[in-house]
Amino acid sequence: MHLKSIVTGVLLAVGAFAAAIGGAEAAAKCGASTGQAASGEPIVIGGIVSIVGPADFSSSGKAAAAYFKCLNANGGINGRPVEYMLEDDGWNPEQASQVAAKLIKDKGAVALVGNMSFIDCGANQGIYEAEDIMVVAGVGVPRDCFFQKNYAPTNAGPRVSNTKALIDLYNSYPGEIKKVVCFAPNIPNVGEWSCNGAIEWIKSKGGDGMTIAFDPGSMDATSLVLQAMAFEPDVISVSTPKEIAVPIFAAAEEQDLADKVHWMGPASLYNPDFPTAIGDYWNGKVTVDMEMNAADAGTPDMDNWLAVMDEYGSSSDPRDTFSQAGYLAARVTAETLMKLDPAKIDRPTVTAALRGVTRFESDIFCKPWYIGDAPRHNANNSGPVAMVKDGKLVAKPGCIDAEDPELADVHEYEKKIGIRQ
């Protein structure tokens, strides 16, 4: 499946924001912000990421680690420090199962936080449910990550991302959007699934769509573009990492297709280098989804995330969308645990408390995020989109609500807890 090239592209597509954002000026604020180090009995919290293997897929876990360091330097959980244990699943299902068992059974973790892996969701669903431990993940990618009672990612995921971009185009060009083609790498539970939300949504509007799944290791960009154009689409979504998308846009430019079809992509293209990589020809012609608000927005939570990374992370840790996700996962967990009696914190009380999170607000999110007692979790389903404009990705005002038919049960649950009208 050439997973290495795909994942490396995903990392490049979001990691480049480190240079674009810069550092923070204000001091980091975490927990009670006491300025006094916690010295009580540690609370063990684990995390699973993928490091050794095709690529280092651990930005979310590193951000969670930085936040917990900041928390421990500022009073911890009402005096108790968090012992954050981050484990590498090595991109291997067997190893993923081993480290999960280590954290949960051997170390007695009360929760897992900041997880970021293509492997973890599928490999460990059984133990998460059997041990009734909550995973407040930073980044979910495969479908498995969004269909578990005990796994709640703070990111949106590729399917929601694609659907939002299409909805923005549909609303921006009334009556023009009827047929959609979506390109996707052929990774099980990622590729076609990432396109299906947009395809199903346009069909619900009386339109039509198709997915073209391909092996990126043997991709012929011109053939893909010609195959898509044979469908006579109004929109083409390039649901790939940047490094795979660029040759597709180059092939489309050779065919002079910028004004013949509307072009879009999910958050994997939300990269400050993307507009330059595809060139001036595409100015004002490409819509790109954003899973969260703009990383350089300068809002209080955005600035605090950067301050936490600058003071308690490593200079080599990415300052990217995935890092934002890990920061949020750690923060919501810490703020939830601080409401508990510190002498009675254990796995059952933590699981119950996390499931009681029904309205966590941050200016990094477009709407309140939640866990709740739902059978599955995809709470980050509303966000902005950006346009390629003058060599930059410029965020459009407002937030797009993902109306993916697959989210019907999620939306119903949101009505139940008062998040949605």
Image (spheres, rainbow, N blue to C red):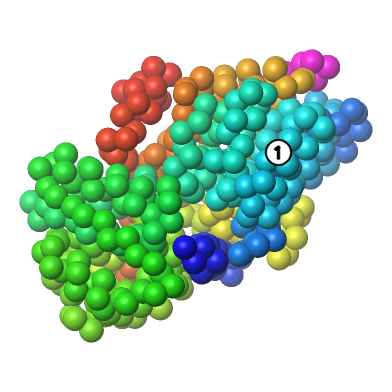
Question: What amino acid is found at the position of numbered circle 1 in the picture?
Answer: Ala
The image shows residue 341, relative to residue 112, as above or below, that is: above
On-image quarter of the C terminus: top left
- Name of the residue lying farthest toward the bottom: 254
Viewer-proximal residue among 109 and 414: 109
- Could you say where residue 222 lies in the image, as x and y percent from the top left? 26, 78
For image coordinates 32% across by 77% down, the residue present is 220
The stretch drawn in magenta includes residue 342: yes
Q: Quadrant of residue 191?
A: bottom left
Image height of 335 relative to 216, above or below: above
Compared across the picture, whether 333 is left or right of 185 comes to: right
Q: Residue at x 39, y 22 (%)?
A: 413
Report the side of 391 relative to 330 (left or right).
left
73 displayed left or right of 299? right
Farthest right residue in view: 39
Q: Please report the residue visible at 73 percent of the width from the left and 42 percent of the height from the top.
A: 98
| Residue 294 picture location, percent across and down | 46, 55
- Mark 1 falls on what kind of element? helix
Q: Which of 40 and 85 lies nearest the eye of the viewer?
A: 85
Q: Is residue 304 visible?
A: no
Q: Position of residue 315 (x, y in %)?
A: 73, 64
Q: Is residue 347 visible?
A: yes
Residue 297 pos. (x, y %): 49, 54
Which range is magenta? 338-344
Q: Is residue 14 left or right of residue 259?
A: right
Q: Which residue is mark 1?
A: 100
Residue at the spot 39% in from the left edge and 61% down from the top edge: 185
